Image: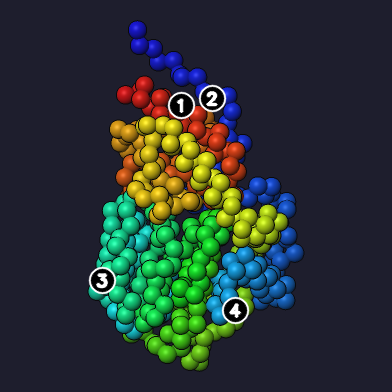
Amino acid sequence: MVTNEPLPTPDVRPARPYFSSGPCAKPPGWSPQNLATESLGRSHRSKIGKARLAYCIDLMRELLRLPDTHRIGIVPGSDTGAFEMAMWTMLGARGVTTLAWESFGEGWVTDAAKQLKIDPTVIRADYGALPDLAQVDWSNDVLFTWNGTTSGVRVPDGDWIADDREGLSFADATSAVFAYDLPWDKIDVATFSWQKVLGGEGAHGVLILGPRAVERLESYTPPWPLPKLFRLIAKGALNEGVFRGETINTPSMLAVEDAIWALEWAQRIGGANGLIARSDANAAALDAIVATRDWLGHLAIDPATRSRTSVCLTVAGADEAMIKAMAGALDKAGAAHDIAGYRDAPPGLRIWCGATVDTADIVALGPWLDWAYATAKSAD
């Protein structure tokens, strides 16, 4: 006889069931009461406002191990705004190659082709794979995502980026910074937001410029109009104030204080090495779960290019309805929030393994995935 009785749930829930790939889990120990508030209600142009913005930049430089040759600016619009700013201000001086193997890379293709009308060379790969990086022509500017958040596929390293490149390398690195040791000598432009590996708040982006990018900005004027929010040049030279915390528009000082708290937390756990170690441990724990379940797999085909932050999983026989049912059941049970795969990706699950997640919660998630899978199957 078929019954509709619910399946028994596992005994232990993840203590912090926050596995969203953005905004991501807050750091362990985070509380709004822990945030400094002296800058709130003050002008971002005040002494304290500028000091806190500059301090945030200094902390990011230290944790990213960024050389003095590279500048850091806090800009509007999250990672998207930062990357758009880079595209609109620097592209058009030479040919452009765009790499796309997931949704956000495709977004940069659309912007280059349909908005800026550059007619880029596009090198694509399906979800789960990486394009042939040997095809890249480094006489062009090259746009790519370092870690494909919606496909779980990343570039393996920076060795494929030519040392003698004529074009600029533009890296959308929003789910890579603070989780990988990035080769800054290979990156001319990088962008990210605090809401990923730091578990910070959205709305603000971070723009990193190497010396070759600064040279481009100061020697090239694009043919299209630039909105005020994108303007990095003042009187023919780089607006250095942007890279000292003098933001183009009004930032949220609450979001800045939240980022500062996360950066100071990162210092306390060992800095860059501590953040990388936590991400690696989380990815290894999830990989162990996948390895012992024949119904669960990795969307990323090659382990050498598999993300250690936004890990995308396949579920045997699953369609969108089944994934929705699994994710909904886990959310309702308080065992895992926001883990359905990205809307443009093949049906599957996406588990964030960045540094703000505790490995014990990844381990505890395994039996709950079994429960959700069995529950969804029994409802067919």
**Mark 4 burial class by Cα count in 10 Å: few <14, some 14-19, many 20+:** few
| Residue named by callout 3 | 121
| Residue named by callout 1 | 371
Q: In front: mark 2 or mark 4? A: 4
Q: Residue at x 73, y 51 (%)?
A: 33
Q: Judge from the rendering whether residue 155 lies leftward or rightward of residue 132; answer left or right.
A: right
- Dot 1 lies on which element? helix
**If you read the primary sequence from the N terminus, does the residue marked by circle 4 or circle 3 appear first?**
4
Q: Judge from the rendering whether residue 30 lies leftward or rightward of residue 203; answer left or right.
A: right
Mark number displayed over residue 10:
2
Q: Is residue 331 visible?
A: no
Q: Amino acid at mark 2?
A: Pro
Quadrant (top left/top right/bottom left/bottom right) for the N terminus: top left
Mark 1 touches mark 2? (CB < 8 Å): yes
Report, in whole angstroms, how far the alpha carbon at label 1 lies from the one at label 2: 7 Å
| Residue named by callout 4 | 68
Q: x%, y% of residue 202? A: 53, 58
Q: Residue at x 30, y 60 (%)?
A: 131
Report, in whole angstroms, how far the alpha carbon at label 1 lies from the one at label 3: 46 Å
Q: Residue at x 39, y 35 (%)?
A: 296
In this view, the residue farthest toward the top is: 1
Instruction: Compare residues 377 and 329 and report the one nearer the observer.
Output: 377
Q: x%, y% of residue 217? A: 44, 84
Q: Amino acid at mark 1?
A: Trp
**If you read the primary sequence from the N terminus, does the residue marked by circle 1 or circle 3 appear first?**
3
**If you read the primary sequence from the N terminus, does the residue marked by circle 1 or circle 2 appear first?**
2
Q: Amino acid at mark 4?
A: Asp
Q: Judge from the rendering whether residue 195 lies leftward or rightward of residue 166; answer left or right.
A: right
Q: Amino acid at mark 3?
A: Thr
